[in-house]
Image (tube, coloured by chain):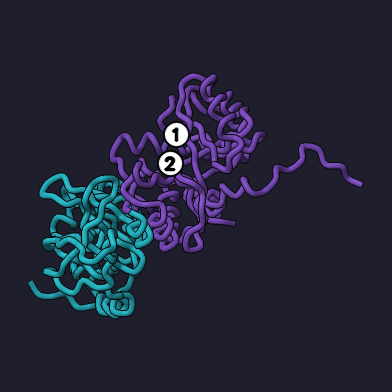
Amino acid sequence: MKITDAAVFVHPNGDSSVRRMALEAKALGFDSIVAMDAPSCEYEGVTVYSGRCIRDRAMRDVIARVKQARDTDAVISVQAGDNGFNRAALGLKGVHILRGIQSAEKTAFDHVAAKMAADNRVAIDLDLSPLISTRGIARQRVIHRYLDILVLEQRFEFPLTLSSHARSILDLRSAREITGLCSLLGMDTEDVARALGGIGFLETPAPAAVRVIG
Amino acid sequence: MSVRPPTLRENRRYILARVQPAGTPIDQKELYYAISDAVTSLWGDGMAAVITPAVVAAEGDYVFIRCRRGTERELAIALSTVTGCRETKLALRILATSGTMESLRERKKGMSRSPVSAGYAPAKPAEGPSETPEIPEQLPEATAEVPEYQVGGVTYTVTHCDGQKVDVIEKGFKNTNRLFLTRPDLEKS
């Protein structure tokens, strides 16, 4: 299982080159990173997945963009919106990750959306940057939202990914630090390891809906 | 007030952390305030009083942070939320935890490589036919000649080299951005 940071931003969207980000990620215990708007490559043993984040309000535009990106090897993620938007995005073929749940409205991700995520094998991303960089009520809200998502994850078992959303090598955190931060959400070491390896679902085929025995 | 006997003193733990980016001037007091703010914000006043964080030494890029024994985990989590000191953006990378500073110093000796930091020395245009100046293996003194590079039409000078890693800073007096690159990145630029 590859330990992956599911979203980093490299130069020119950040201040670190993709190679430097890969080097630092390796030093911090990662096997792979998802670099937004960067080509996929392998550097010093670290796999760099190309990431594409779609942030459109209209579902029509999202569908068009997902269709464009579907044929590439990019990890496609959609920025979460309201509940209807999220359900539609989760049902779209080709979407790998739903991001930004913490900044969406309270009812944006419910048990129906959770079931859809589990059925369609769409990962829900937990962005750790608000836990790291915000303070006070803003951080408390994010923790509360993530706790709610984790309750649904326990019940429906949809994939989770963890991302630092690092725009600099200074924003990256080691796998051990991430484990510590996730302990604030009640996640134990196994949960964190599973979430850090969450991007692995891209490489494993989806289990068949019906299995013929004998 | 007489000094307590060792059995009555509270037990401490020391955390060795490296400050990134390399070459950042560390003011112990300012760093203490940043850490104290992070601990209080994350764990509250009650737990902060139990942890009692303190920056006991800063040696080069390394800092020694003290806490009460048994609260290392909490302090480590709080340290991962430290993103800056005053206006300077930085990250603390925890390297080791120990009961004595002496053993951490031993560890530090084993870990410390010889990265090369350059001061803000005046740069001199590169000589020779090659357009891209050679990336220095060593920048022995602050007065060494530091090559310049063009990245996206902006001139940068090297501030730190460590193996493949090269930090460059925008040439100028104010609003100078730092970029974190590698040697192949500079060779291509």
Measured Cα–Cα span from mark 2 to mark 1: 7 Å
Q: Is residue A115 visible?
A: no
The answer to whether residue B5 is above or below residue B185 is below
Give the residue displayed 73% in from the left and 43% down from the top: A207
- Kindly identify which chain the residue marked by label 1 belongs to: A
In the foreground, A22 or A172: A22
Q: Quadrant of residue A138?
A: top left
Residue A85: give x, y in percent of width and height.
Answer: 53, 22
Give the residue displayed 31% in from the left and 53% down from the top: A170
Dot 1: element: loop
Q: Quadrant of residue B26?
A: bottom left
Give the residue displayed 39% in from the left and 59% down from the top: A24
Q: Which chain is cyan?
A: B
Residue B168: give x, y in percent of width and height.
Answer: 25, 56
Residue A180: give x, y in percent of width and height.
Answer: 41, 54
Q: Which chain is purple?
A: A
Question: Which kind of residue does numbered mark 2 sit on?
Answer: Asp
Residues behind callouts 2 and 1 on a single chain:
yes
Question: Which kind of residue does numbered mark 1 sit on?
Answer: Gly
Dot 2: element: strand
The numbered dot on residue A100 is 1
- Kindly identify which chain the residue marked by label 2 belongs to: A
Residue A29: give x, y in percent of width and height.
Answer: 46, 61
Give the residue displayed 48% in from the left and 31% down from the top: A54
Q: Residue B88 vs residue A168: left or right?
A: left
Q: Residue B171 vs residue A174: left or right?
A: left
- The answer to whether the residues at label 2 and label 1 have Cβ atoms under 8 Å apart is yes
Q: Find disc 2 in the rendering and name its residue.
A: A127
- Classed neighbour count for the residue bearing mark 2: other residues with Cα under 10 Å, few (<14), some (14–19), many (≥20): many
Q: Quarter holding the N terminus of chain A?
A: bottom right
